[in-house]
Image: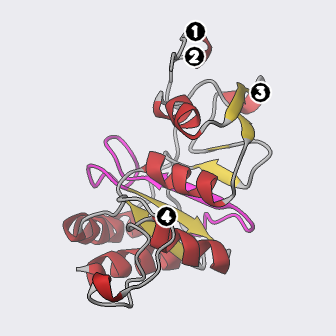
């Protein structure tokens, strides 16, 4: 089961130039795992993004502000300021990895690699990789089988992708290797116009 997911992660590593990749069930959960790992308490990001991002900040109790910079109408990716985390939902290019960061990819509808759903984190921090790979799958060490033989767990989340999504991702990635789509601007609504209540 995990072999196909690992094969896809290895293909992402080769393609993006990142030393490590962690496939998840969606980009928002990839971002969540990074925020949790780095214990982010506050950050700033563009107001022109998908609604799941401020919802995630509320879920995690992170104080956030919308930035007012020229790049706020982004193409391909944008940073969470004062962190090393990037929302790279609309970018997938050869050797795109940016050293010292955790870039979160999306494989949803209308994304460069449109598996249908799913996401991934590309990164170069081995300690973060080792922790996040377990966090993604209920805190499990996938080298211990059956899982009940694992005596100690750190808190984890059920954010694993399916092997079928990984197989589809591998097939689609082969096509992208020949022709990478250029990142393009997408008009998102200005989230400063909405109110989120707990």
Residue at the image point whose x is 19% and y is 67% from the top: 164
**Residue that label 3 marks:** 70
Would you say residue 19 sits in the magenta stretch?
Answer: no
Q: For the N terminus, which image quadrant?
A: bottom left
Residue 141 quadrant: bottom left
Which percent across, then down, holds residue 184?
52, 38
The alpha-carbon separation of the residues under discs 2 and 4 comes to 34 Å
Q: Nearer the viewer, mark 3 or mark 4?
A: 4
Farthest residue in the front direction?
Answer: 151
Instruction: Determine if the magenta segment contains residue 102.
Output: yes
Marks 3 and 4: CB-CB under 8 Å?
no
Looking at marks 3 and 4 on the same chain, the residue that comes earlier in the sequence is marked by 3
Can I make out residue 132 in this image? yes
Query: Disc 4 marks which residue?
Result: 155
- Residue 61 drawn above or below residue 19: above
CA separation in Å, label 1 and label 2: 6 Å
Question: Can the viewer see residue 17?
Answer: no
Q: Secondary structure at mark 1?
A: helix
Q: Is residue 173 above or below residue 39?
A: below
Give the overall secondary structure of the magenta segment.
loop
Residue 33 against residue 18 in the figure, above or below: above
- Disc 1: which residue: 193
The foreground one among 63 and 184 is 63
Element class at badge 2: loop
For discs 2 and 3, the disc positioned in front in the rendered view = 2
User: What residue is shown with label 2?
Assistant: 190
Mark 2 / mark 4, whichever is N-terminal? 4
Rounded to the nearest whole Å, what is the CA distance between mark 1 and mark 3?
19 Å
Which residue is situated farthest in the left direction here?
A: 164
Q: Tell me which segment is drawn in magenta.
A: 95-118
Between 103 and 133, which is closer to the camera in this rendering? 133
Q: Residue at x 63, y 66 (%)?
A: 97
């Amino acid at each position: 089961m995990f072999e196909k997911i690992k094969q896809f992660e290895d293909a992402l590593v080769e393609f993006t130039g990142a030393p490590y990749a962690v496939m998840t069930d969606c980009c928002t959960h990839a971002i969540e795992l990074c925020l949790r790992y780095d214990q982010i308490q506050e950050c700033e990001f563009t107001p022109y993004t998908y609604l799941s991002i401020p919802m995630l900040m509320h879920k995690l109790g992170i104080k956030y502000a919308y930035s007012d910079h020229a790049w706020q109408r982004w193409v391909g990716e944008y940073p969470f300021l004062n962190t090393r985390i990037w929302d790279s939902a609309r970018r997938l290019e050869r050797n795109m990895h940016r050293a010292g960061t955790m870039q979160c990819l999306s494989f949803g509808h209308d994304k460069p690699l449109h598996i249908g759903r799913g996401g991934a984190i590309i990164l170069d921090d081995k300690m973060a990789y080792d922790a996040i790979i377990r966090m993604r799958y209920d805190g499990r060490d996938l080298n211990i089988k059956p899982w009940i033989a694992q005596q100690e767990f750190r808190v984890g989340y059920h954010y694993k992708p399916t092997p079928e999504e990984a197989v589809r991702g591998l097939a689609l990635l082969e096509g992208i290797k020949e022709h990478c789509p250029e990142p393009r601007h997408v008009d998102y609504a200005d989230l400063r116009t909405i109110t989120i209540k707990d």
